[in-house]
Amino acid sequence: MQYLSVRSVSCYKSWHCRRLNVIVIAVILTSVVIGLVIWPIVTRVSAVANSNSDNAARSRPLIDPDTPDSVKHKISADGAEYVLAFSDEFNTPNRSFHPGSDPYWTAVDLYYWGTEDLEYYKPTHVTTVALPSGNKGEGKNGALEIKITKDRVGDQAYTSGMLQSWNQFCFQGGIVELSVSLPGSGTAAGFWPAAWLLGNLGRAGYGATTDGTWPYSYSSCDAGVLPNQSDPLLSSLPGQRLNSCPLQRSSNSALDDADSSEGHGYHPSPGKGRGAPEIDIFEGSFDTDRRSPTIAQSLQAAPFNFNRLANASGFRIPSNIAETNGTMSTTFNRFMGSKLQQTISALTTLNNDPHILASFYNKANRSDHGTDSTAFQTFAMEYSPKTAGNDSHVRWSINSTMTMHIDSSALGPDRDSHVGQRLVPEEPMSIILNLAISRTFGAVETELIDAELPAAMYVDYIRVYQHPDRIKTSCDPPDYPTKEYIERHAKAYADPSRHTWNQTGYAWPEYTMSNIY
């Protein structure tokens, strides 16, 4: 490879050559900046937005060929027959989920600073494995493995994995079901396994994208869209960045692009509130007082009710949740959120009987802390947005036993906090599977969990069912588009080091709010 030396030009002392030298240097520096900074960001986001938003162009169909025919239909809680819209059985061993390796999933490479995690996420810690015969999973004995190890990366003492379907597979409404084997023995606090949904306008771990979008599911123009909801004691959110209030400019064209903070910002759906809502299918934790493992299943919402108290008439826990076999009991979660989110949550406590723990946790019946692959249980969540034409609701279950039901009245208007109806999420939702350790979520008994490392969460399958008249599996649907918005704001969606929208240099849309009260 030859290198150009500007000084090697024989006439470099002349004014013309010096001007040429400056131009050449400028061109070289510009090329370096484009090659090292701008081009990787653009290509990383464009590749995902262009190749992964079109389900028709997949190398593998939405429904995994390994999915048994016997499970391709499911009856909803309302008695309607749903059909399988997406599945992954994870049967092929040694799959790679590095960026660009899989049509539906990506394992991220980042530190999840938002919850002050003690681990660093690496793609190397997410793969698929063959399970021994005799496991309680279905299919051909394969499973997704998300592993956590005591390997330091920077300031983080652990390394683990997070798998996302962001901008690759999304859906609007339906039933999502997973068969999961939880990490560890279920006898110590620290592991935080989770499966959850996030609106595609937010990318988990990329803080700038969720700044002003998470966890909003709101389309009213009132105090709820303002920073702190005008009450710093209630909320510390920056306000709904993509709200339904009238834009100050009549146009929302390329001239208003947010490529400069001096612009007016771009809104993907003027007049409609947009956001990145969150529904947690399950989150595993541990009650150190009762020495029992717990499962939280939640809806995160914004803006908030006064004191973050949802309308009690709109959510319930079925009376039969205390199962006759004593496996588990469910109550309303006392955690109702923080200044960052309002939470409606059910908390299921598992019986700490060794036989019961051994059916949920893959190291519960191993004195040598090895892995037992028989511990699979089913977690599911069913939700129906208002756009489905029915009463909107969210329902959660564990092993086909419903644990909590929420309908739209739980998120109804609240005069005390001057907010209107919050919505059961209507955005295209991506799926996230991860295994974390964080003291912001619960206690961490370091010595006890370290003794169980390496540990892993296994997922035998994940399946999404939808009503046959409402199959919606796009990340860029016409009613809630995301593709153009993501491409216009590539820096936010490709760089996890940018924690706020202002750090990207993009503008917030400007709204007319003179009649907000």
Image (spheres, rainbow, N blue to C red):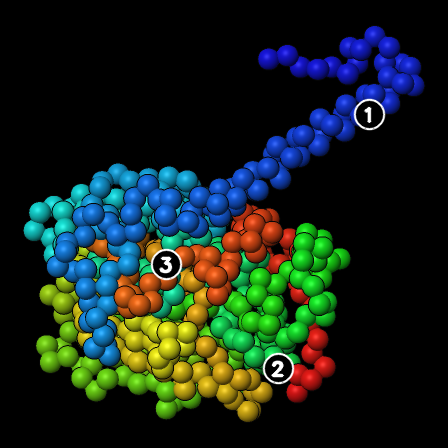
- On the picture, is 277 further left or further right than 380? right
Which disc, if any, is residue 22?
Answer: 1
CA separation in Å, label 2 and label 3: 33 Å
Q: Position of residue 119 (x, y in %)?
A: 41, 51
Question: Marks 3 and 1, how far apart in space?
Answer: 52 Å
Q: Is residue 327 above or below residue 198?
A: below
Q: Which residue is mark 3?
A: 473
Q: Measuring 14% from the left and 51% from the top, which residue is drawn there?
A: 139
Question: First in sequence: mark 2 or mark 3?
Answer: 2
Residue 251 shows up from this direction: yes
- Up-down relation of residue 299 to residue 430 (above or below): below
Question: 253 left or right of 330?
Answer: right
Q: Is residue 350 visible?
A: no
x and y percentages locating residue 270 in the rendered image: 60, 68
Front residue of 24 and 515: 515
- Of residues 330 and 249, the one drawn nearer to the viewer in this rendering: 249
Picture coordinates of residue 404, whole percent (x, y): 29, 79
Furthest-left residue in view? Answer: 134
- Secondary structure under the numbered disc 2 in the rendered image: helix
Residue 51 occupies quadrant: top left
Which residue has dot 2 on it? 223
